[in-house]
Structures are given as C-alpha cells and as structure tokens.
Image: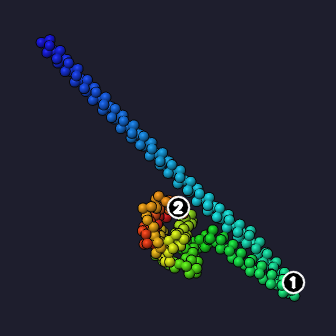
Amino acid sequence: MEGGFQTDEVYLIMAMGILTMLALSLALVLFFYKSQRRLLQEKMIAQQSELQYQEKLLYNNILTQEKERKRIAKDLHDDIGSKLNVIFLNMHRIERAAKESPPILDMVSDINQVINITIDTTRRISHDLLPPTLDNFGLIEAVKELCETYQKSDSVNVLLEVKQNDGRLVDKTTELNLFRIIQELISNSIKHGEAEQISIDLWLGSENLKLEYRDNGKGFDLAKLDDKKGLGTQNMESRVKMMGGKMNIQSSMGEGILVRVSAEV
C-alpha cells in the first residue's frame, strides 16, 4: 500500500511539474507575444509620428513658399515694375530732347525696347507667382486664363471643360491649392511628358469639387512612382491632403497620364 501511495505521489508531482512547465511556457509565449505586439505598436506609432512630422514639414514648406511668392510678386509689381516705368518715362524725355541727334535717338529706341521687354517679363513673372485673376475672380477664370496662356504658345493644345460651376469657393486656400496642382500637372506634361494634347475637366460644386486631368504624353511606369517622387509630386499630394481630398494617378509607358482629384468643400 505504501508503495502504491508513493507511486501516486510521484505521478502527482510529475503531473504538477508538467502543468507548471506548461503554465510557465504559456506565460513565456504570452509575454513574448505581448512584447512583440507592444514593440510593433511602438514602431507603428513612431512611423506614424515620423509621417505626420514629414507631412507637417511639407505643409509648412508649401505655406512658406506661397508667402514668399506673394512677397516676390508684390516686390516685382510695386517696386521693380514702378521703377521700370519711371525709367521708361525718363527715356521719353531724353527722346524729345534729342530730336536733332539721330545716333542718340537710335540708342534711346534700343533702350526703350529693352525696357518694354523687361516690363513685360516682370509682369509675367509676377502674374505666374500670384495670379490676380485667381484672387479677384476665382478658380475657374484663373484656370481659363492659364490654359489660354499655354494655348497661345502653340506648343501644346490645352482644352478646358467646366462641367459644373456653382460659383467661388468660400475657402480661397483650396482654390489656390487646386490651381497650383493644375499648374504643376501642365508643367510636368510639357517638360517630362512632351504632351501635345491636354484636357482638363472641372466640377466646382457647392459641396464638393472634382478635377480630371489627361494628357497624351509619354507616360511613365506607375510602379516606380513611389520610389522616385519629385518635389512637385510631393507638393501636389500635400496640397490634396491640405484640401482634405484624394488624388488618383493612372499612367503607363506611352499611354499618357490620367489624374483625378476630389474633395469636399
């Protein structure tokens, strides 16, 4: 009987030992799982924080860029532009005073021509930096003017179709962001895509806006876009996020590009 009790005690001790080892193993597995989960969560939080930091940097860069554009445009128009006009008027005074001297008149004529070209260039740069049409008349009129400017160059055919126009947006920053996106897209189509045909469809509703942009350029491999995003593309993405919108890009080699942007207003 004593031997039987001892055997039962041994089995009981062994069973308890096995259960203890299983419990410890399970505790170790749970601890490891929770540790890995916590590390993964911390990594995701760190990545999210880094992403938010990068987005904030881009937002700040865009805001700083717009402020600098506004300042430069104002300086060009108010300071340099006005001084060029004063020089131009003074050259007319010299021209009147030198009626009897053909060599001086020829020189004045050459200088006036250079001044006129410089005034036109200054106005164009100032206009590109901060289009007064956008501020005064809104997005649709500004995009029309932009398209007409490229149309006159005869290098590309730009077609604009306004599918819906419920009037100006309350948020002028959204208007500016969408205008800059269209500017960047046209620039990319001409410089990189070598497009000859561009079509822009705009829906400007009271509750949402939509842009559909196409060109017949060279296109690109969409799979490589994430690996090699230029500053222009990053700025466009940041502007879309600032609008609280979405952007979808479709392209392939030799097939041009299709870009869709939508946002609630």
Image point (84%, 87%), residue name = 102
Q: Report the residue at 74% width, 80% height from top.
A: 113
Q: Against 194, is 173 above or below?
A: above
Q: Is residue 218 above or below residue 6?
A: below
For the point 25% across and 27% down, the residue is: 19
Q: Is residue 162 something one can see in this rendering?
A: no
> In which quadrant of the rendered image does the N terminus lie?
top left
Asked whether, in this view, residue 14 is left or right of residue 151, the answer is: left
Q: 174 and 248: which one is in front? A: 248
Residue of label 2: 230
CA separation, marks 1 and 2? Answer: 56 Å
| Rendering coords of residue 59 (x, y %) | 56, 57
Q: Is residue 109 left or right of residue 175?
A: right
The picture places residue 17, in percent across and down from the top left corner, at: 26, 23
Would you call the spot at circle 1 few (<14 residues within 10 Å), some (14-19), or many (20 or more)? few
The secondary element bearing badge 1 is classed as helix
- From the viewer's perspective, tell me whether residue 129 is left or right of residue 179: right
- Image coordinates of residue 96 in percent, x first then y, are 84, 84
Residue at the extreme top of the image, as rendered: 2
Which quadrant of the figure has residue 92?
bottom right
Read off the residue under disc 1: 97
**Kind of element beneath mark 2:** loop
Q: Which mark is residue 20?
A: none
Q: Residue at x 50, y 47 (%)?
A: 49
Report x, y in % for residue 50. 51, 49
Mark yes or no: residue 197 visible.
Answer: yes
